[in-house]
Image (cartoon, rainbow, N blue to C red):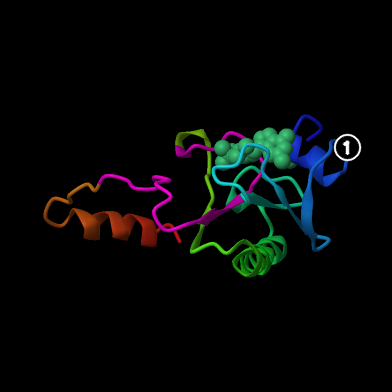
């Protein structure tokens, strides 16, 4: 995946401000932060969405997410942290290499992660849940 910007960062072919490297995953600063201190965590091996990443690599990535959020809470005096991950363009994914956003939050910062709420018809929630369960 030579044209993938995050593969290039993982291979040190373009500069990045790195936070932590586990060997299997890498944490680095987002160049266009939603809030100052916004960190990205990626698996080193390329995969577009979560199901493209091996269990071993995914475990390592989520442990890196936890390690870095712990460090952010200790160092940035933030009141909260959003962990955000998008799968495919319809969900807002722009860079097609799995990544987790770690966004530090302050009370009243007005960063809007709110979304509207849909209402289910009678039996619809159970029906949709059944579809998901039967695909596990
Ligand atoms: P997405 O919209 O795909 O969930 O998030 C991609 C993120 O990657 C964005 O927040 C964007 O600011 C960040 N980004 C894009 N290109 C680069 C880059 O070259 N270096 C770094 N450090 N971050 C990048
Ligand atoms: Zn990649």
Magenta span: chief secondary structure: loop
Q: Give the range drawn in magenta.
A: 91-116
Nearer-the-camera pick, 84 or 129: 84
Looking at the image, can residue 107 be seen? yes
**Figure label count:** 1
Q: Residue at x 88, y 43 (%)?
A: 12
Q: Residue at x 13, y 50 (%)?
A: 121
| Horizontal side of residue 129 vs 70, given as left or right | left
Q: Mark 1 points at which residue?
A: 13
Name the image quarter holding residue 11.
top right
**Helix, strand or loop for disc 1:** loop
Q: Ligand 1: which quarter?
A: top right
- Locate residue 116, reporting x and y percent: 26, 44
| Horizontal side of residue 1 vs 108, given as left or right | right
Q: Please state, as top left, top right, bottom left or bottom right, where the N terminus lies in the image.
A: top right
- Locate residue 106, reporting x and y percent: 47, 57
Name the image quarter holding residue 112.
top left
List the single residue furthest toward the top.
Answer: 3
Residue 97 covered by magenta stretch: yes
- Locate residue 92, reporting x and y percent: 49, 37
- Locate residue 130, reporting x and y percent: 30, 60
Residue 80 covered by magenta stretch: no
């Amino acid at each position: 995946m030579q044209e993938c910007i995050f593969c290039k960062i993982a291979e040190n072919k373009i500069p990045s401000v790195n936070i932590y490297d586990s060997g299997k995953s890498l944490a680095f600063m987002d160049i266009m932060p939603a809030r100052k201190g916004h960190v990205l965590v990626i698996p080193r091996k390329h995969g577009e969405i979560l199901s493209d990443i091996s269990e071993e690599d995914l475990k390592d990535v989520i442990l890196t997410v936890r390690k870095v959020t712990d460090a952010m809470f200790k160092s940035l005096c933030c009141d909260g942290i959003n962990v955000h991950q998008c799968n495919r363009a319809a969900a807002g994914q722009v860079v097609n290499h799995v990544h987790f956003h770690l966004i530090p939050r302050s009370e009243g910062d007005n960063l809007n992660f709110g979304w509207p709420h849909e209402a289910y018809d009678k039996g619809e929630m159970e029906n949709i849940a059944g579809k998901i369960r039967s695909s596990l």
